[in-house]
Structure formats: C-alpha cells, structure tokens
Image (cartoon, helix red, strand yellow):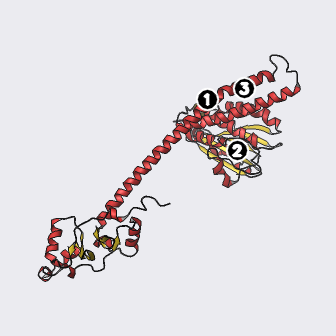
Amino acid sequence: MMTSEALETIGTMAVPLPPVHATMRCEDVDLRFQADPDLGALGVVENGRPVGLINRYDLITHLSRDYGRALYAKKPVSALMDRAPLIVDASISVDTLESLIADEHQSALLRGFIVTRNGRYYGVGTALSLLQLGMARSERRNRALDRARQQAEEASLSKTRFLANMSHELRTPLNAIIGFAEVIQKEMLGPMGNARYAEYVSDIHSSGQHLLSLINNILDMSKIESGSWRIQPEMTDPVEIMDASIRTFRERAEGRGVFMSMAVDARLFEGFVDRQALRQILLNLISNAVKFTPPGGRIEVGAQPLENGAFRIWVRDTGIGIAPEHIPVVLAPFGQVENDLTRQYEGTGLGLPLVKSLIEMHAGRFEIISVPGEGTTISAEFPPPPGLAAIGEPAAAMAALPGAASG
C-alpha cells in the first residue's frame, strides 16, 4: 500500500510564475530577475506551451561577458534558453521526480525544470522548492512519528494498568481458594471421609498455586513496564536467599525425581542487591529448572564473589535445553518455544523476561548458555556497591566455578 508521501505530486511544490515569451528581449528578462532576487528560472512559452527554460545564472553569465550585453540584450530570450529542459506533468509523484533528476537530469537541480498540467505551462521548479518540500515532508513525518509514539505509550500504559488491576482482582479470590484447600487438605476441621476428596483437594491446591504464580508474574512484569517497581539495593546475604528459594522447590523437585544442590564460594558473604528482586530472580530460575528437568536430572544453584564486591549467581540444570535460535524467543515477554518437548509444560512465558528485567535494573549482566538435550546454565552478575574495595582474588574465584558450557 502506497503512503501519502508517495502519492504526493509535484503540483504541490511547483511555483506558478508568469512565464516569458520566446520573443521577449534578454534585457527585459534580466529586469524580471533583478526585481526578484529569489527567482532562479523562468519558463519560456509559445501559445501557452513550454518551449524552453531560461536560468538566471546562464542569462547573467552571458550578459556579463565582454560585449555580452551589446550582443545579447536586444536578442530574444530564445537565443539563450535551454531548449531541452526537464519538463514534467504536475500529476507525477515527488518520488518519481526525484528518480528522474537523479537518473537522467541532474542539471535540473541547478537549472530548474518546467511543470505542466495537461501539456500546458503551469510553473517552474527549482532546487530551493525541492528543498522546501523535503523539509515539509520531514516535519510531517516527525509529527506522525511523535503521534504514533504517544499512541503506543498510551496503549502500553493502558495495557499495564489493565494487567495490574486484573491481577489484583484475581489474587484475592485465589488466595482464598488456596487457603481453604489447605484447610481441607490438612483436615483441620475433621476428616474428609472419602479418599478421593483428598485427591481433588490436592489438585485444587496445586492448580491454585500455579495460577497464582502466573498472575504474580504478570503483575510483576506490569510493574516493571510501568516503572512502578523501584529496586532498593542494600548489603544482603545472597546465600540466605538462595537457601530459602531452594527449600521452596525442594519437595516439588524430589517429587519429580530431580536432585537439587547448592554450590557457594566460601568467600561470598554479602552482595549489593535488592532482596525482593534477588528472591524473585532465584524463584523464577529454579522454578523453570524444575519444570524442564526430567526425572533423574540435577539442578545446581551457585554463587561466587567477583571483583570489587560484585558477585555472580547461577542456576544450572540437566534439562531439555534451549536451541540457540530460540533464546531470543524465550527472553521476549509471553514468548514460548513450541515443540514436542515444551508443549507439555504450562506457563505464560514471563519468567525469563522478568528475570532479565530485574537484573538489568541493577545494571547487571544476564547470560544463558544452553545445549538442547543436555541442559541450561543461566547466570546473573551484580555490580559492586559504590566505593567498596576489591576483594580476594577474582581469578581464583572464577576458577572455582564449574564450566558453564558443560550444561
């Protein structure tokens, strides 16, 4: 579909100047040019139809030569006019005109060109008029881009507000469902009386937990997009948060036959990080690792100190892995890879984008190394606190880390 700019015709930029007749004397044409310093060219016509173009500078050059005025002043302007100027109809597009000038009539930028309408003289065009048109087009394009950007921002803000409001509205009844399911599951008010009820309640509880997790991810992502999630880094014990995060998923992992372990460099004591953000990062990474690691697999959650008080965490699994071409997909909000291995797993596709956003809010570095069928290592490096002196020997700390490429 052609844009409005492509459909724009040169009739919008042609200057409808009164032409001169081919028999008009050069000295009279010179007076026309002297009366209007901005006038670059004039069309030469006979019976209303263009026969040539007289350029201001050609005329002045000829008249200023020795004996030039005496030689040419009384002659008709047809003696000096360009007899083969570029002549274009007012209905052609500006893009077509630009192509004509660039490909066949470069001199038209200096000499000008004639614009006709239905074969009769209409006006002249010059480099100045083309420049003015280009500036006007750029201004219109910039205004259109500004409007589009504003509309996109408003749409994004509306979407974010909708997601946040819906997430809040859904979390309240979900928490009640999960709470009542736990009461029934633990038989706090007496026995259920039928073994199948226990199975149903367990399904209700796990489904509610799953749905609540999805809603929390949507709410967290909407907070980040709207700028309402503000991180507050402080000196924190990462190992404490890692240990609590592992405990959250240990029962689920063991129920799937997946072994979990923690590998921490003994020199790591504190890191400069937002506690809530680090907890969210670890919960999402471990949840993904448990989800995509088959029975008999292993998950390692590790951490090590780096230079100047910076530190690094990682979650490594022996799961299904991610093909290199699919990594950009899983890092995009709501992006999920569809294949035989992943189709059986549920989720919104917000876990990794949320992790990446939280790490970038710390000015940290996020990395995925994965081999399909062998496993995935996802790591995050957090920068040092301002003014903290260098610690230990970072090279030795790096050497203590198992090879990330091993999957």
3 vs 2, front mark: 3
Judge whether 289 appears above or below 57 on screen: above
Crowd class of label 2 (few under 14; some 14 to 19; many from 20; radius 10 Å) = some
Q: Which mark is residue 168?
A: 1
At 72% from the left and 34% from the top, the residue drawn is: 210
Mark 3 / mark 2, whichever is N-terminal = 3
The answer to whether residue 51 is left or right of residue 342 is left
Q: Nearer the viewer, residue 8 or 310?
A: 8
Three-letter amino acid code at the position of disc 2: Leu
Percent across and percent down for residue 127 are: 31, 67
Looking at the image, is 11 positioned above or below residue 171?
below
Work out whether 228 lies above or below 21: above
Mark toward the start of the polypeptide (1 vs 2): 1
- Could you tell me how far apart the alpha carbons at marks 3 and 2 are, in whole angstroms? 43 Å
Residue where numbered disc 3 is placed: 177
Q: Single out the residue that lies furthest toward the left.
A: 70
Instruction: Determine which residue is flagged by label 2.
Output: 401
Residue 393 visible to an observer of this rendering: no
Cα distance in 3D space between marks 3 and 1: 15 Å
Mark 3 burial class by Cα count in 10 Å: few <14, some 14-19, many 20+:
some
Coordinates of residue 248 in the picture (x, y in percent)? 73, 31
| The quadrant where residue 358 appears | top right
User: Which of pointers 1 and 2 indicates the residue nearer the eye?
Assistant: 1
Q: Residue at x 46, y 48 (%)?
A: 148
Q: Secondary structure at mark 1?
A: helix
CA neighbours of label 1 inside 10 A, class few (<14), some (14 to 19), many (20+): some
In this rendering, the answer to whether 353 lies above or below 14 is: above
| Numbered label attached to residue 264 | none
Q: SS of the residue at dot 2?
A: loop
Examine the rendering and report whether any part of residue 148 can be seen. yes
